[in-house]
Amino acid sequence: MPSPFPGMDPYIEQPELWSDFHSNLASEVQAQLNQRIQPAYFARLTPYVTYEVIEVSQSYGIRPDVGVWQSQPRTSERLSGIATITPAPVQSLIPLEVPLRLYNVEIRTTGTQQLVTVIEILSPVNKRPGHEAYSDYQRKRKDLLRSAAHLLEIDLLRGGERPPLERPVPLAPYYVVLSRAGHRPTVEVWPISLKDPLPVLPLPLLEPDPDAPLDLQAAVASVYDRGAYAAQIDYTQAPPPPALSDEQKNWLDQILREKKNATHR
């Protein structure tokens, strides 16, 4: 079942869905590009691992973006010996970190494997100041901007702190930024509203080869269908934070009403 929205679905920004969506989108982008850039180039998924602090209770914990785990009660054992172990009078909690696997897509030349373009799909931890993944991404971004590789940043998250730009651009919930190696410091920016379909993006290759098209809307639609997100999302609830403006909320309510009416016909 397709998403009710013409572009990005804000409900996919829910923490329990995003990690799955993120990895599936990276894989879909890789597959789409490999149909278009071979034999001179290939697209490869590159994983990297960061750590996320989760909130836990004494009975269970929830790992954002991944699932639910159940802690096992510790059984006491009687040990032989003279000394008797003194039980702790109280219990508390410490921050618990779990690994979070993220992906980017690298475009490389066949044979020499020269890095040509890096496609970064931002995740919430990349936009959260103070998180190590935020600092790591800022360093990685700076290194890429100093290199001979092109950088395509896809930000489909309304929340968090966006990577900095030197000149203001129109406000929008979503952005794509393309930094061509030979055009820096000028970058191309696509501000994307909730009402807009996602764009077909240019993927720069080595000169004199022309840009390859990346149909971001087709990729997101395919992932939405394959990931069965329609069965996982409760559209009767409000979308996840940040809160929508009144205009956005009215538009969203209208879209969902039309979808509901069409389903019941």
Image (spheres, rainbow, N blue to C red):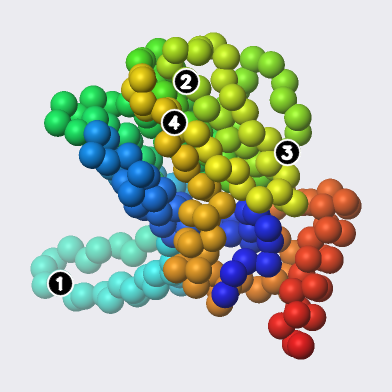
Q: Disc 4 residue type? A: Asp
Where is residue 235 drawn, in percent x and y? 70, 71
Number of other residues with Cα within 10 Å of mark 2, as a class: few under 14, some 14 to 19, many 20 or more: many
Of marks 4 and 1, which one's residue comes earlier in the chain?
1
Q: Earlier in the sequence, mark 4 or mark 2?
A: 2
Assess whether mark 1 and mark 4 are in contact (beta carbons under 8 angstroms).
no
Helix, strand or loop under label 3? loop
CA–CA distance in space, label 2 to label 1: 67 Å
Residues at marks 3 and 4 touching, judged by CB atoms closer than 8 Å: no
Residue type of the residue flagged with mark 1: Leu
Question: Is 157 situated above or below 64?
Answer: above
Which one is in front in this view, the residue at disc 4 or the one at disc 2?
A: 4
Q: Which residue is mark 2?
A: 180
- Horizontally, residue 100 falls left or right of residue 232, namely left
Using the image, tell me which numbered label, if any, was put on residue 211: 4
Q: Residues within 10 Å of mark 4 (few under 14, many from 20)?
A: some
Q: Secondary structure at mark 2?
A: loop
For discs 4 and 1, the disc positioned in front in the rendered view: 4
Circles 4 and 2, Cβ within 8 Å, touching? The answer is no
Residue holding disc 3: 172
Depth-wise, is mark 1 or mark 3 nearer the camera? 3
The answer to which of marks 1 and 3 sits earlier in the sequence is 1
